[in-house]
Structures are given as structure tokens and as C-alpha cells.
Amino acid sequence: MSRDLGNELPGALLSMLDGHDLSSRMGKAILIATVDAHGRAHPALLSYGEVVAVDARRLRLTTYRTSGTSNNLRRSGRLTLCLIEAGMAYYVKTLAVEQEAPSNPALARFEATVEQVLVDQAREDLEPGARLTRGIEFDPGRPAAEVLAAWEAALDTLRS
């Protein structure tokens, strides 16, 4: 059952999205959803090397410039991030606005203002002992050092 935490990222999410200790986030994905032109949810995945918390109310992210996700964000700005890992699930509802393009012409850059944060947990009275055992994971398909260097560069660009 989801519980509303307000319009700021709690400490746990701030530390997950601060862009530090990226090696611990290697292989973990963030499910996002935008709203397509037909009003339907459009899911996509981002890595922790593509999203950074500027502060408790603002996130910056990068997506492919010509992707459906970028087009949806330009049109409606509605973005929900689903941070799901062992023992936790947070849904961060935001309003995103495109910013000046990053140095890579293939990418778009957005700043998202947090509007609502929900935490989702099984109700102990209805589902005793139920818990998430893992989140969405992926294999980056290249050496970790190479991926981490690319993530660091992307997050440095988003921070500026």
C-alpha cells in the first residue's frame, strides 16, 4: 500500500540519487513512466548514471534526444520515477522541463521538480512477511570501469 511522503525526496532517495558511490548502483535500473500522445503510460528504463538529485526537490536526467520519452516530456512534462530495490519501492512524481542541451547532441537534458513521493510497502496485517527481494537489474554489456567513467561524465554535465 502506498503512503504519501510529501513533495521532497527522503534521505534514502537523496543518497541513492546523489551520484556518489555509483559502483554500488551498477547494474540497477530505474523504471520511469511518461505520458504518451494518447494519454497512456509510456515506460522506459534509466540507469543511475542518467539521473541525479540536485536537492530534495529537483532531479536532473538525460535521455536520448529523439526518444519517445523525450518527446513525451517535451509535450506534457509528466514523469514518474519508480525506484525499486530489495526491501523498498518509491514512486517519485515530477514535472520535467527541458534544459539547455548537454554537449552530446544525441542526448536531451531535463530538470524535474518533485511534486509527490510515495513509498510502497506490503501491509503487515494483510501480507505478513511480504517484501521485495530485488529490483530491476541489467548487465551493462561492457567493463564496469568504462561504464562508471561514462556515468561520472554524464552526471557532472547534469550537475552543472
Image (cartoon, rainbow, N blue to C red):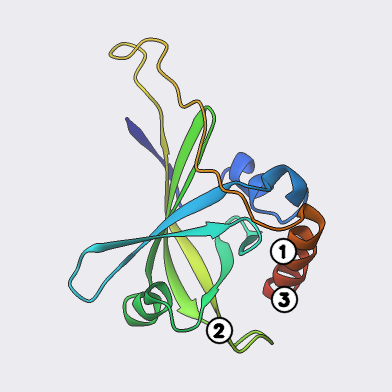
User: Can residue 112 be seen in this snapshot?
Assistant: yes
Q: Which residue is mark 1?
A: 151
Residue shown at the point (44%, 21%) measured from the top left = 131
Foreground tag (3 vs 1): 1
Q: Which residue is mark 3?
A: 157
Task: Count up the numbered dots.
Answer: 3
Foreground tag (2 vs 3): 3
Sequence-wise, which precedes: disc 1 or disc 2? Answer: 2
Give the amino acid at mark 3. Thr
State the SS at label 3. Answer: helix
Q: CA distance from mark 1 to mark 2?
A: 19 Å
Quarter of the rendering containing residue 130: top left
Q: CA distance from mark 2 to mark 3?
A: 12 Å
Foreground tag (1 vs 2): 1
Q: Nearer the viewer, residue 17 or 37?
A: 37
- The quadrant of the rendering that contains the N terminus is top left
Residue shown at the point (49%, 66%) measured from the top left = 113
- The quadrant of the rendering that contains the C terminus is bottom right
Give the amino acid at mark 2. Gln
Residue 35 shown left or right of residue 144 in the figure: left
Residue 11 shown left or right of residue 127 in the figure: right
Provide residue 59's location: percent of width, then percent of height. Answer: 57, 64
Residue 151 shown left or right of residue 85 in the figure: right
Q: Nearer the viewer, residue 123 or 86?
A: 86
Provide residue 120's location: percent of width, then percent of height. Answer: 40, 34
Q: Nearer the viewer, residue 129 or 68?
A: 68
Residue shown at the point (26%, 71%) measured from the top left = 36
Q: Which residue is mark 2?
A: 99
Q: CA distance from mark 3 to mark 1?
A: 10 Å
140 up-or-down from 124: above or below: below
Give the amino acid at mark 1. Trp
